[in-house]
Amino acid sequence: MLNMYSGGVLGLITSSGPMAKTVMGILLIFSIMSWTIILAKLIQFSRTEREGEGFIQAVKENGSFKKLIAAYRESPDNPFYKLILSSYKEIASKQKDNNPRLEPETLPLVENAMKITISEESERLERRLSFLATTANTAPFIGLFGTVWGIMDSFREIGVRGSTSLAVVAPGISEALIATAMGLATAIPAVLAYNYFSGRHRRILSKMENASMYLLNILEK
Amino acid sequence: MREETWFKWLIISTILHFCLIGALSIPVKKFSRKIDLSSSYSVSLVGDMGGSHGAPPGPAGISEGKNLPAKEPPKPAPAKVKKPAPTRVKPVPVKQEKEVVSLSKKKTPPVKETKKTKETPTKDELDALNRRLREIKKRTDYLDVTSKRQTGSPGKTGAGVGTGSGSGGLPGIGEGSGKPIDLVTQKYWMDVREKIMGAWGFPGAAFKKLEALVTIKIRKDGRIVDINIDKGSDNKVYDESILRALRAVDPLPPIPSSLNLDSIELPFRFVPEGTT
């Protein structure tokens, strides 16, 4: 028989009441979702950052716009490539009758187009990170709710039994506390990951801005 | 990011979580401390009473059975209540039938026959022996104690009015043993049960299968002198909760003088609420 004294964490959960089980289930879903996001974002961010470094390197090395387009043609998902693409589209729409020289009024438009791309990419990177923030903020409270409910139950138990012995109170409180423990276990990785990703997100954004400056420099030449 | 990538990570994350939960529960289950309470042992409650240190420990109680974890220093037995081992007859509890399955493996070994008191019994001891035999004949079964609270405040019903609603009831009166339990003993037994029930609490919901058979020995003045766990429940916490409850009720009401007994042994069956 799996009871709370022999079954470890699983035993504690299985022997708890329906409300505690519900709370635990919600927390488990939160935890699974937040870890999905953490893992996926980890991959996405490191790939983007790697690509950014490569791109800036490439921009520094060869100063030609066309060469860059050729170099990044095979990776259309690359946000830095999108930077070039958007500016190129902007230039192409403004550059009439195959004038090889760039009009001076085109540059601000290109800059705007790049800014739009940056903000779009930033939004894409930031997407679902807010779920981590939500988890970080709400999971402890959900856990706390389970705990408070469990302790309410234990006190009711004391009232019903008319006995305050530890044997009556302890199991209920033990059950109750696991909800808080689960809430914290869900929230802590989410907080850490959210802060980590926010920092990385900022770094990537500044890289994209740098890249757009480099591109503008190239265009101005 | 594309959808299938998310799905992949979702699956990986789910697997990780279940692995973690599994990892957290298995080792605890494996290494959790378990003590075997299935063999009978006694706990003395009056070991440290003033002036009794010099007295030789009596053969009763703790001395029975070799594998007994003696929890407290041996008890100086009250002079007359010698408990010769061979007389310990273990009544077969009637109500046990339905729950015996889970426990049958660890059935209490019949410790009683193994040891015999060495010295030849004195007249005093024979006297006590006869008395005990009488007591044992009176005793037909274990009386149920549930952790459920009975109606009314337990402290007040100690006087014995309107007790024992529902569960329990005196078992096997008039059948089994030739001689029915007399009314005074019955009432006393019920009073004691009522008092224990008032002090004993255990959340029953998750522990449907628990059962402990405990015999307590009460001195004339109501002090518990011996607690004998005839059959433990395999659950340390459960058994300890019973011992705690018995300690809490310790000065029980004195044995009714009309019974003319130095001590009395009352067997109880402790079951969680809602199982009787």
Image (tube, coloured by chain):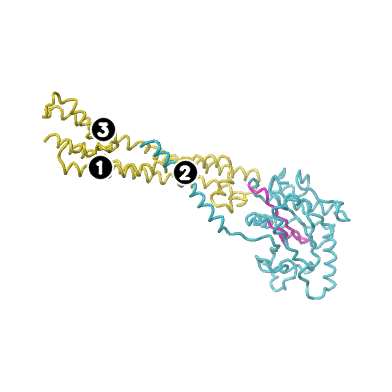
Chain colours: A yellow, B cyan
Asked which quadrant contains residue B83, the reply is bottom right
Disc 1 marks a residue whose amino acid type is Gly
- According to the picture, the residue beneath numbered tag 1 turns out to be A52
- Say yes or no: labels 2 and 1 on the same chain: no
Percent position (x, y) of residue A122?
Answer: 29, 36
- Chain assignment, label 1: A
Magenta range is B206-232
Indicate the secondary structure of the residue bearing disc 2.
helix
Judged left or right of residue B32, residue A79 is left
Mark 3 secondary-structure assignment: helix
The amino acid sitting under disc 3 is Thr
Residue A128: x %, y % from top left: 38, 37
Residue B71, position as x, y percentages in the image: 65, 65
Residue position marked by numbered label 3 in the rendering:
A117
Residue sitting at the far top: A97
Q: Which mark is residue B14?
A: 2
Marks 3/1 same chain = yes
Q: Give above or below for A78 relative to B184.
A: above
Residue drawn at x 88%, y 56% is B179
Asked whether B151 or B266 is in front, the reply is B266
Q: Position of residue B8 (x, y in %)?
A: 42, 41
Residue at (76, 48) in percent of width and height? B168
Q: Mark 2 touching mark 1, by CB under 8 A? A: no
